[in-house]
Amino acid sequence: MLIQEKGKGLKALRLIKMQLGEPDSSGRRRPVPLEGSDFEIEVDTVISAIGQYADTSALAKTAGLLDERGFLKCDEETGRTGVPGVFAAGDLATGADIAIRAIAGGKHAARAILAWLAGGDYRRPVEFLSKKEDFGKPTEAEFQQEPRVARQAMPMTEASARVKSFEEIEQGFSAEQARAEARRCLECGCQDVHECRLKEYAQEYGANPRHYEGEIQKHPIDESHPFIRRDPAKCVLCGRCIRICLEVQGLGVLGYVRRGFQSLVVPTFGVSFGEDPLCINCGQCVSACPVGALTEKIPDGKTVPLTEAIQEGFCSLCSVSCPVELRTHGGLLVRVKERTLEGAGGTAASGAAGGGLLCEKGRFGLVKLLQAAGRGGEPAPSAGGKPLQTAEARARLEAALGKARQPLLRLSPVLAAEVLDRFLAFAAGRGIPVQAEGLAGLEPGWVDLLRRPAGAAVTAPGANGVPRILIAGGLDRANNVAFTDCLALQRRGQARLWYYGETEEVYERFFERILPDPALLAEGLKGAVASVGPVTVLVNPEQLLAEAGKGVERKVLATLKAAGPEVRITLYWNSRNAAHLLAALGRKGAGPEAQHDLLLDAGLSADGKAAVRWGLAAGAQPGQAELFIPLPRAAFLSGLGKPSGREPLQAGELDKALLQNLLVG
């Protein structure tokens, strides 16, 4: 009660103490006044903030909707009331609460209505959740490796300005402050919560972890690996990571130690994961892990659970062109996962790859390359960092070409074949010579091998014994998935492997013969054909040149060109469409870079000499190019891939607008 003195304004506020009375129909004890407990407090201003309530007066005439206190009676899970066909959600059903619970209640009520209309019943699904506090209260020691960082101070409007307006007092964090505050998160959530098989099965079969309470093993999280986070406390000791590393990759980085309740899966000799010299960063262990014990590190550094959208594509960083799934959250490329092509099978050695495997380049290299790239062709073309309209950008391109006497177009083979073909048609129409990025310096004779028909696949024992696969040119480093397929053939007894060049020490045990000089390939071919008949040769010309030098490259090329039809040759490259681009350019595509006074560059290069550059939005830096035209991720990962010695691979149809916005029409 407010107490006022006549002519003098507010004097006091009279209050009364309350006590809990008898429980009502919901079981809650409602407050009732305590007689004789009145008291007063002196005040000169009172601001009324007494909360809110749902107005149910319009429902009072309908029997069965309200309880004796005037609150709506309904099922807490479905919002169903005692009146057929009437459902409720929000504050009417729960009392005053936050908006997000009202939204959730509305969704569940809608599902219950659909079930009721169909003559069925609806209950909210019960989600199995395992929380840290279920295993004991977290202690300070568990977070001792985390640095103590003070909370960001919220910028506030000065008090002198507040009293003169009703503007917001809190001004909000700057972008840098917001990032700094977000980095303070201790990352309590499990990154694998959306795909955890243990969670899925526990929920499906109604598992109750309370039945198995007891001693808990706690282990520190291993963050030493550059790409993988290892949390032994979540490991269920299934051994899938051990098997895929040993049986598929042939490495054996992981293994069991100790016995019984003390068992652990650890890297070789218990060293930190990131320090194990056997690990080649392929990430197969992450794919095999059914729980959150092994997870990819998210690019922005926060290992938190995120809902993901899936886009299908092919890895563009070598000509194996492994099928991939791009997992995105909004504009962030979170991770890349392997994908299996339905109906495809075989191995790289047999000329077909069904997917299911990735190497370091595909799983982690693509993320590093594309994580900051724009989506859908945004932003707009720019010059000196300033956005341009399409018409102005086209005019600038034409002006640059009009002034040039010797323009040169450099194309990256990582681009989709449709994009490359569009650029090639543009260059042909303008008489502009084209150079293939990364292929400059190669012997032009490799083009002749591209046109040579491939022989029959050699993947099974013949009349003269087990066939040989001869590998040259750093395939284990540049095209690791194809190399891994060869190891699988060797383990199954379907082939024996010879290696020409320097290979990793861990792989040496797989080869029947290793010759450090690839120039000795001619001798190997002659002996293999004489002893077992047809042989398969796998070679990466780019890697061969980089690792062995020009002289060896020429000798290997001459040997392969002179080989007879009993030698099946498959060329591998460091990008998915190198073979397609080189075949289109012919012998002019290789060799040294041509003289030019205007360089047009399309691809992944950040060469500061390019006056006009098409590339990922992330690569745009003011001042690097007179004109920058952004390309979306789809130009690099979707569309058509044409690896040599294999059938073309298609990942979706490229948007026609993408090809039109290249400004080369």
Image (cartoon, rainbow, N blue to C red):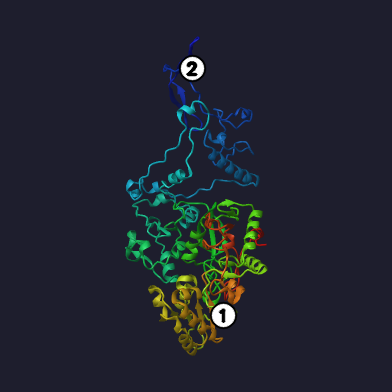
Which disc, if any, is residue 1? Answer: 2
Which residue is at the front of the view, 191 or 664?
664
Q: Secondary structure at mark 2?
A: loop
* Quadrant, the C terminus: bottom right
Is 255 situated left or right of 283 in this image?
A: left
Q: Which of the two labelled residues, at mark 2 and mark 1, occupies the earlier sequence position? A: 2
> Residue 409 at x, y = what percent?
59, 66
Number of numbered tags placed on the structure image: 2
Local secondary structure at mark 1: helix
Q: Residue at 52% x, 37% y: name it.
A: 98
In terms of image quadrants, where is residue 588?
bottom right
Nearest the eye: 382 or 35: 382
Q: Is residue 192 above or below residue 502?
A: above
Circle 2 residues within 10 Å: few <14, some 14–19, many ≥20: few
Position of residue 177 relative to residue 545, above or below, is above
Disc number for residue 386: none
Identify residue for label 1: 449
Q: Nearer the viewer, residue 201 or 218?
A: 218
Label 2 and label 1: CA atoms lie apart by 98 Å
Q: Amino acid at mark 2?
A: Met
Q: Nearer the viewer, residue 305 or 436?
A: 436
Q: Are marks 2 and 1 in contact (CB under 8 Å)?
A: no
Query: Residue 196, percent across and down?
Result: 47, 56
* Callout 1 amino acid: Leu
Q: Is residue 46 visible?
A: yes
